[in-house]
Amino acid sequence: MMIRQTVAAASLLGVLALAPAAHAEGLGAELNYGRADGHWGTEIGAGYALDVAGFSLTPGAGIYLHDGDAELYGRVEATYSLPAFATIGAGVRFSGDNTRPYATIAMPIIPKLRVKGNVGPKYYAMGLTLGY
C-alpha cells in the first residue's frame, strides 16, 4: 500500500511540475465525479499521453476528494483515437489497497476538450479532460 501511495504521489508531483508547460503536446488534466472505493467524490488529476499512430499510453495521478477526505490515486490508460469521433480504451486505477480495471471513452466537445466516462467493477466516473 505504501509503495502505491509513494508512486502515486511521485507521479502527481512530476506531472504538476510540468504544469507551467501546459501548452506542450501530451499533457492533460481531468476533473471527474464518480464512485470509487465505496464513496462518491471528485477526482482531480493530470497525466502525460505518449502517442504512436492513433494509440496512446497515458500514465497519470491525482487526488480523490470524498466525504471530507482526500486520497492519492494513480492510473494508466491505453487508448485508441478515432479522429473527430471518440477515444476508446482500457485503464487501471490504483488507490489505497484497491486496483480497479476499467473501460474508458472520451468524445470531443471542442479541440482539446472532451467529455469522458470510465466504467469498471466498483468504479465509475464521468467528467472532462483538457489537453492530451
Image (cartoon, helix red, strand yellow):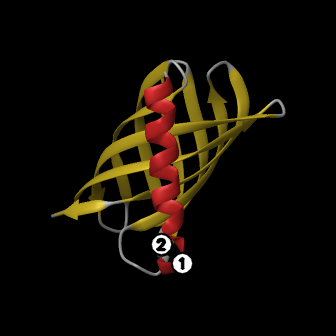
Name the residue nearer the viewer: 97 or 44.
Answer: 97
9 w.r.t. 99: above or below:
below
Marks counted in the figure total 2
Q: Earlier in the sequence, mark 1 or mark 2?
A: 1
Instruction: Residue type at mark 1: give it.
Output: Pro
37 w.r.t. 57: above or below:
above
Q: State the image coordinates of residue 77 (x, y, percent, origin top left).
A: 35, 44
Q: What is the crowding at mark 1: few (fewer than 14 residues within 10 Å), some, or many (at least 20)?
A: few
Q: State the image coordinates of residue 28 (x, y, percent, origin top left).
A: 47, 64
- Determine whether, in the image, residue 39 is placed left or right of residue 77: right
Residue at coordinates 45% horizontally, 24% vertically from top-left?
A: 100
Which residue is outermost to the right?
68
* Gap between marks 1 and 2 measured at Cα: 17 Å
- Determine whether, in the image, residue 22 is placed left or right of residue 101: right
Q: State the image coordinates of residue 39 (x, y, percent, origin top left).
A: 71, 24
Q: Which label was assigned to residue 35?
A: none
SS for tag 1? helix
Residue at coordinates 51% horizontally, 67% vertically from top-left?
A: 17
Which mark is nearer the camera, 1 or 2?
1
Q: Which label was assigned to residue 112?
A: 2
Instruction: Residue type at mark 2: give it.
Output: Lys
Residue 113, visible in the rendered structure: no
Residue 79, visible in the rendered structure: yes
Residue at coordinates 44% horizontally, 49% vertically from top-left?
A: 60
- Determine whether, in the image, residue 66 is placed left or right of residue 114: right
Name the residue nearer the viewer: 72 or 37.
Answer: 72
Q: What is the crowding at mark 2: few (fewer than 14 residues within 10 Å), some, or many (at least 20)?
A: few
Q: Which label was assigned to residue 20?
A: 1
In the rendered image, the quadrant that contains the C terminus is: bottom left
SS for tag 2? loop
